[in-house]
Structures are given as structure tokens and as C-alpha cells.
Amino acid sequence: MGDDSPDEQPSWWKQNEQLRAELDLPTYDAPVFTDETYVHEVVSALEEEYRCDIQFADPTPGADNDWEIRVNGRPVRTVRRWRDSEANTVFEMTSQEFRETITEVFDD
Amino acid sequence: MAESNQSLARRSDHAKSNKLAKKLQDVPVIDVDVHTSFRNEGIQRDMLEYLDEPYRTQLEYNLRPDTSSYDGMYPTDTWDRDMSGKLPTELMQVTDPVEDIEEVLSNEFHVDYPIVNHLPEFNSIPQTDKAVNLNRAANEVMVDRFLEGHDNFSGLATVVPQDPEAAVEEIERVAQHDQIVGILLNTSGVGTPLGDPEYDPIYRAAEDNDLPMVYHGAAAADLAIDFPILQYELNSYFANHSLAHIFSQLLTLTSLIENGVPEKFPDLDFVFQEAGVAWVSLVYRLNRDYKERRSEVPLLKKPPEDYVRDQFYFLTQPLEEPNNAQHLQQHIEMWADNLMFGTDHPHFDIDNTEVLMRHLESLSEEKRNKILYGNAAEVFDIEVNL
Amino acid sequence: MSTKKQDLSLAENEHIVAQEDELADGDRIVVLLNGREVGVFNVNGEYKAYTNWCAHQGGPLCEGPVTGTVEADFDRDSLEVELDWCRDGEVLNCPWHGWEYDITSGQCLSDSDVKLRSFPVRVEQGNVIVST
């Protein structure tokens, strides 16, 4: 289970916890890959390594659960997203697969 | 004119002097559910003068000793209610207000203000005109025989739902009597559930005349119209009686809510008799479904529970009996503001006032008194001497 | 399109989510921003951004069907109920349990105590920018 200690948590973590608490919802946890690593940690590292912007977006909400991985605004791959029993986000790929996806973009 | 088969034991003076009885001596008690023995010959004979023909002749014929009683008048079924005498369900005949109500209820149950009803079974009479006639006569007899001259008595008039127009006329008529304090609907055997818009004229007339609506089910022949399986496929009266009252009330309450009746008539109160308190948890499920399907019931401006807490009341009788008495306590506490006391005299499953008091002990005196008389005094507009 | 154009000098909490012409009236997109999903709608020409958590059980509300809803009026004299299909294109239905929200205000129609917090959205040089 991805486990960020409070010192290592990004600045937005507390805000998300608070938003959840305001609505009496289950405890917040940041989005993860299927191997339970935090998406934001892997993304930050890759953005720094390749000096790029990486974004997850669903341009057709409601149509299906396929999201886009966008590098510098350009979609490079789709990934399925679902919610766990606490309503937290899981992207259906391993962090390894994700790293390979990004690396491929820059290895041309 | 009471018969001499009083099987209610008279309590000794010692028994009457327990501390709960003492508490009740100082508190006025309104009994919201007192039945007459409607099919008693004396009461039926009183009805004759108020009936149009051919119903007068019909009833007269049925009262002859050589006819089988009430065939062609009132429905029956084949449940062995009294278990062949093992469990007499009617403790006595109630035909006289003083001997059969006043003396019994006030002496034995500390009741000061009885609210009386006939609970007749007219829902399954196919000829609507006959049902309307019999019903009007029944209401006349209620006033004549049980109310006039007995200042601390109040009565519930019945209407037959099959003819909403006639029901409106009847409401306007009975509203003239000060002692008629509510309109009773027998909820077993109505066919179309009682919240349906076809009954709106009844609710409007009741609201116009400041009369609350009272609902009472019956584990009896009329039930077959709404729940034929209960009446024809169950194997015991134990099962039939357990379900009949709550099935009818679950359906009635849901129907009132789905059709927005408390929203349409915001000054109207709705009182449910003889189903106990536990079934009211239906409301929590209604809350959830309401949030999921709000646009299907757009008249509702609040969740169902809000309407129920604002405008609905429930008689405690017959108190349920969970293995753990604490659990009943919790139900009572959850709904204390909406409860009223009723004995269901002369039926055997009376809740003794003192037994009820034991369950009310954890409540504040203020809440307890609301159940014993406060809620009923407000809803039925009964003046109570404190 | 880069999410952080130098000439826009965006703050840490500001994110480009789409181009203006990608989010025309009636369009929407859901984006992962600062660890949570945010739905951005163009409703009646105005941009609105809400966290993708339904107040009921946290469901992905921004992905539910966008419809209208029904309101009713009762006339006590005629005893008639008039039904009105209204707010077409302005009502969001959570895909998990059907709770309704007015997209223009965030007001929950299923539970009047709930109103979603909306996040500021602005357009600069054709970019739709959300502040979390």
C-alpha cells in the first residue's frame, strides 16, 4: 500500500483530505497504479527526468472508463480507471508499464 | 347494555397502588384507540333508524334469530381467532359508554379521555351505495350512543374510500359535531392505496375541517382485496395477524409519501393505529430511494422522514417484544415525539398503561406526557384538564 | 499544447485542462489535478469545475448523464398536478445512485443540505485554466 508519511506528502494532500471530510466521505488516498505505487510520485520523477508535462484526462466522461495519458498535451496512450471501495482512484496499469509508456515517447 | 361476561380481572387495591399507577393518577391520559363492538345486536339495531331502504330491511332481516347472522351484510373468514376459546380475543362486549368504556378504562387503565371508533368493515361491500349508507348510520350511532352526554369522550367518524365524493359529504356532515375529532379509514381492503390522487378530495375536506386522518388496518376478510396471499395462502392466524397490520400500513404510508399527500395538505396530520412502532423504520429506506429517484416524485420538497416527523403519528399498541427489551426502548426513543397511547380496548392484546410506562421511564417527563396525552390533545384538539 | 506555457506564468495551483474550442457549450472533461479528479463543464457558455466526488458515497459524479429534471406544482382547487420538464442540459446525475446536481450552481437536488464547491475557471489565450 502506497504510504506517504505526512512530511513527504505533497502540499495538496491535506486539501483533498479536507474536501472529503466536508462531505463525510471515506478517507482520501492519492491515485495509485495497480502495483499500489502512487501515481504522483512516478509522474513527478518522469516529468523531471524528461522535462515534460504529464496529465491524465478523460475527454469523454460517461462514455467509458478510458482515460488518456497526455505528454505535453498530446495523448500517447489510453488507460482504464476505476474506483476502489473507498472511492479512491486506481489506474489499471503497473508503474513499470507507465514508465515504459513515457520512455517510449522520448526514445524516438 | 353490557353482557355479564366480563373477563377483565378487577385488580386489588394493593395492585392499584403501585408507583407507576400513582404517577398516572396525576397525568391526564388520552386513549386514542377504543373500539365499540360494532356487530353487537344492540348497536346494529340502533343503526336501523338511520338507514335508507333497502338497507334497513336487509339489516332487519339479518338480525332475525332464524337467519345466519350477517350473511349478506358483513364479511367473514375462517381463521380461528379465538383458538376455540383458548385465547378469547374480545375481552368483553362494548356497547355502553359508561359501563363498558368509562368504568373499565379509567379504573383499570387510568384513561381520562377515550377516543372511540367502530372500525367497521365496509371496504369489500361491492355495492357502494350500501357501504355509504351503512357507514353514515354507523357514524350517527357513534354520536348518539357513545358521545352525546359524555363530555370526556371523543369519536372518530369513518368514511368509505370507494366513493370519495360521498366521503367528502360525510366529512362535512360529521364535522358539525364537536366530539368528532378525526376521520378514520380502514386500511385493509382498499384496493387502490390510500395516497392515490383519487382520494385527494377526502384529504382536502379533512384539512378544511381541521380533522386529522386516522388509519387502522384489520386482519380480517377485507384484507383479501389487497393481500390475497395473506388471507388465502398462509397457514396460521399467527402469520396473518402479524403481517396484516403492518403490510397495510407500510403500503398506506408509502402511498401517502409517493403521491406527496403531506406536501399537498401541509396542515393535515396522519395517525396510524395498531401496528406498533418498529415498522416505521420503513422511512429510512424511503429516504434512500427518494434521493435516487427524486425527479419521479417531484412534489416532495423534503426527504420522506421529514414529512413523517412533522405530520405523522403512531400508536404504541401493540408494543413489539424483541428478545432484548432495550431494543424496544431504542425504537421508542427514536420516535418519541411522534407516539401516542392507545389501548385497543376491548381486544385482548391491550397494552396496559403501566406496562407502557415502564418503557417510557427513560424518557423525560415532558416527552412521556406527550405520548400519554400531549400529542393527541394537539392533533385531535382535545381540551384536557391538567 | 503544453500544460505550463512560459508566457502564461501559471501559479502552482493553476492548470490548463483544455483549449477553448475543445470545451464548447455542452462539453465536459475530467482531469486529474493535484491528486484528485476534477470535472470541468461548459454549461450555457459558462465554465464550472467540480471535484469528481458525489456527496453520497464519493462516486464519479462528473461522468454521469447530463439531463434535465422534473418539477411539479399542485393546484389545491382543481386538485391537479402539473409536471414540468426543466433545466435541460443543466442536471448532472451521479452514475452510482442517481443523485441529482444542478451544474450551474453545484446545488444538490437530492439533498438540499449539499452544495458542491466549485473551483475558479478562467480563459487566457484560448486556454481553459482551472485553479484547485
Image (cartoon, rainbow, N blue to C red):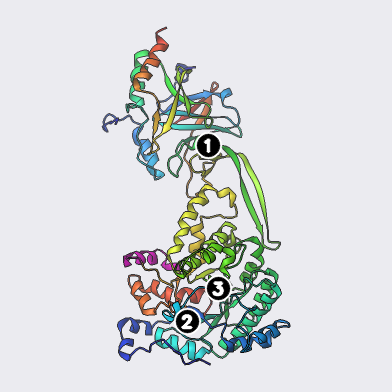
Using the image as rendered, state which of residue C41 and residue B315 is in the foreground.
B315
Q: Which mark is residue C64?
A: 1
The number of numbered badges drawn on the structure is 3
Left or right of residue A39, residue B51 in this image: right
Q: Which quarter shows the C terminus of chain B?
A: bottom left
Give SS at disc 2: loop
Left or right of residue B264, residue B341 in this image: left
Q: Position of residue B249 (x, y in %)?
A: 52, 65
Name the image quarter holding residue B177.
Answer: bottom right
Residue C34 is at least partly visible in this image = no
Using the image as rendered, state which of residue B123 and residue C16 is in the foreground.
B123
- Residue drawn at the location 67% of the way across and 67% of the way down: B201
- Give the residues in magenta: B322-338
Whether the residues at callouts 1 and 2 have beta carbons within 8 Å, the answer is no
Q: CA distance from mark 1 to mark 3?
A: 53 Å
Whether the residues at callouts 1 and 3 have beta carbons within 8 Å, the answer is no
Q: Position of residue C104 (x, y in %)?
A: 56, 39
Q: Which mark is residue A107?
A: none
Three-letter code, disc 2:
Glu
Label 1: chain letter: C
Q: Which residue is mark 3?
A: B77
Q: Which residue is mark 2?
A: B90
Q: CA distance from mark 2 to mark 3?
A: 17 Å
